[in-house]
Image: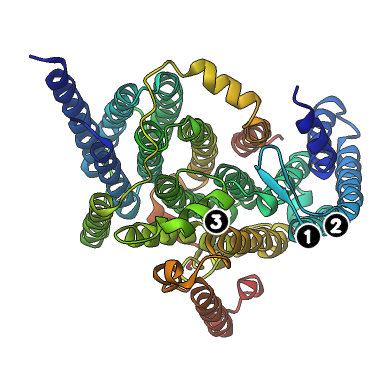
Amino acid sequence: MDPTTVAQVIFYFFAVLTVASAAIVVFSSSLIYSAFALLFTFFGVAALYVFLGADFLAATQLVIYVGGILILLLFGVMLTHKLYDLDLKTETFQFFPGFLVMAAVLLTLTGVISKTQWVSRGERPLNPTTIAIGLLFMREYILPFEVASVFLLVALIGAAMIVRRRRS
Amino acid sequence: MIGLNHYLFVSAALFSLGVMGVLTRKNAVNVLMGIELILNSANINLVAFSRYSVASLDGQIFAVFVIIIAAAEAAVALAIVLSMYRIVKSVNLDQADTLKG
Amino acid sequence: MNPEILQDLESFVPEIVLTVALLLVVLADISLPKLRTRVTFLVTAVGLLAALCFTVPLFGAGEKALFYNMVALDRMAVFFKGFLILASFLVLLAAPGSKELSSTHLGEFYALLLGVTLGMLLLASSVDMLMLYLSLEMVSLTSYIMVGYLRHDRQSNEASLKYILFGAVSTGSMLYGITLLFGLTGSTKMPAIREALASGGASGGNGMALLVATALILAGFGFKTAAVPFHFWCPDVYTGAPTPVTAFLSVAPKAAGFATLIRFFFSGMSDTTTSASQWSAFSAMNWTSLLILISIITMTLGNIAALRQDNLKRLLA
């Protein structure tokens, strides 16, 4: 097989993996299944980043989403249920209205995407991006970078404050 | 050949699934998962545009910030969920009903 | 270090003062166990007043774009900055007297207040979609925490949980709208977005994409300014939150949200220099009347709903 076909097959594999596991996240009746399906979604998205030549971002996605946010969500699931409670059922409500909204959103977006002429300034070559991203953070994006650090500090204070137990 | 629209379609599917999850789930942690799907779909858009049409790293930088914000937001949201669980012993949103909007 | 950035810092003193005050509050809260309630209050008060003093002279400084066009310094931004700092200062004065709040530990409250003020200043002056999104999230996240400040109170917690879930969804869809706009125009800077749209970016099949993007972005702003149809969180949150927080939330973030909305639609979207023919497809959507319509509906519904509310705080919503 020529490389283009292989690339296509791999792309479709990861695209289907991402969307199918996202569907499990949304439709599964077990919280634990949802959480683990989310793992595959995040992995699939990271693989798509690799396809798009975003190496730094793919690593970030793995470290922060899979290693951080997902673990956090799993803790959330575990801490809000009794541990021996194995079937963590989760209920749904407004299923059909929700489904209709989803179908409408999907139709609108796909219609828009296929019709729209996006801006085209050529393709970015597939070079490693880490150095360039680091330089941009220190130059054009210095202000958001610093603001993000203050933002994280505030979030840290807030989260610690909310869960801290009452002192006697 | 795989092009821009392939990625945009994947992202649109993720976005609408996320909206569905947010609308139909009772469990607060599950709603959070839906929100993460929405943020991920936006990130795919950003990186895909960055690669195929804008030809700069602006989109990728934006995506890095989105990931940072998503992590902070998830942490705070889970802190609030846990705090709520301690009081109500449930994380289902229909239990949050002492305030009738 | 680029000398331009150092020059920009001169026009950025209020924000820097607030950040320093925030750090001092956190440090004082940890290191001075006995005095901390008083010291943190004083540091916050001095920080806010100093920021206000540094903001006033900026009013005559003329228009500038700072930090590689991330934030703008113009009369509107400075006016809103002064107003927002003043609002935070009034809340600060009310905080120690509040029964709900004084039973809890106030050090973190002051830190959060400084954080939300900083976020609002940035929000009111940002001209880059990234900066806008970041500062909007900063304001929102801090508001969620402030609403849930009474962590042993069921109502406060519920209000906070609903607020963060609605909030995260609306900012999430706003983000998706921003990405579509980014794909349409190739930039996150509002002036560049305007130019791209003016030079035919909104023609043909792209009008639909623009409409969808704008609707999604409007959802985020609508949440922040509590406009119809995103107003429903308001009564819940106002009832559940501690009273000074309610007072604060009902004024300050809305003002910041409106400031951004004005900037977004009049600096990012509208254009007076383009010829009418290019503009026709775009102005058909008629932002101004849409906004007026939304605000009229908001006010009317608000008043009608207020008649039926017995709770005073809900009435404020």
Whichever of callouts 1 and 2 sits on the residue coming sooner in the sequence is 2
Number of numbered discs overlaid on the protein picture: 3
What sort of colour scheme is used for the picture? rainbow
- CA separation, marks 1 and 2? 6 Å
Chain label for disc 3:
C
User: Which amino acid type is shown beneath numbered disc 1?
Assistant: Arg
Mark 2 Cα shell of 10 Å, populated few (<14), some (14-19), many (≥20): some
Mark 3 Cα shell of 10 Å, populated few (<14), some (14-19), many (≥20): many
Task: Have a look at marks 1 and 2 and say if they share a chain.
Answer: yes
Check the picture and name the quadrant holding the C terminus of chain C. Answer: bottom right
Residue A87 seen: no
Q: Which residue is mark 2?
A: C59
Q: Which one is nearer the viewer's eye here, C178 or B16?
A: C178
Whichever of callouts 3 and 2 sits on the residue coming sooner in the sequence is 2
Of the numbered discs in the image, which one, if any, rests on residue C159?
Answer: 3
Q: Measuring 43% from the left and 71% from the top, which residue is drawn there?
A: C277
User: Which amino acid type is shown beneath numbered disc 3?
Assistant: Ala
Q: Is residue A106 above or below residue A149?
A: below
Chain label for disc 1:
C
The secondary element bearing badge 2 is classed as: helix
The secondary element bearing badge 1 is classed as: helix
Q: Is residue A119 above or below residue A149?
A: below
Tag in front: 1 or 3: 1
User: Which amino acid type is shown beneath numbered disc 2?
Assistant: Phe
Q: Which residue is mark 1?
A: C75
Q: Residue B9's x, y, as percent?
A: 24, 43
Chain label for disc 2:
C
Check the picture and name the quadrant holding the N terminus of chain C. Answer: top right
Q: For this view, does A135 lie left or right of residue C83?
A: left
- Cβ atoms under marks 1 and 2 closer than 8 Å: yes
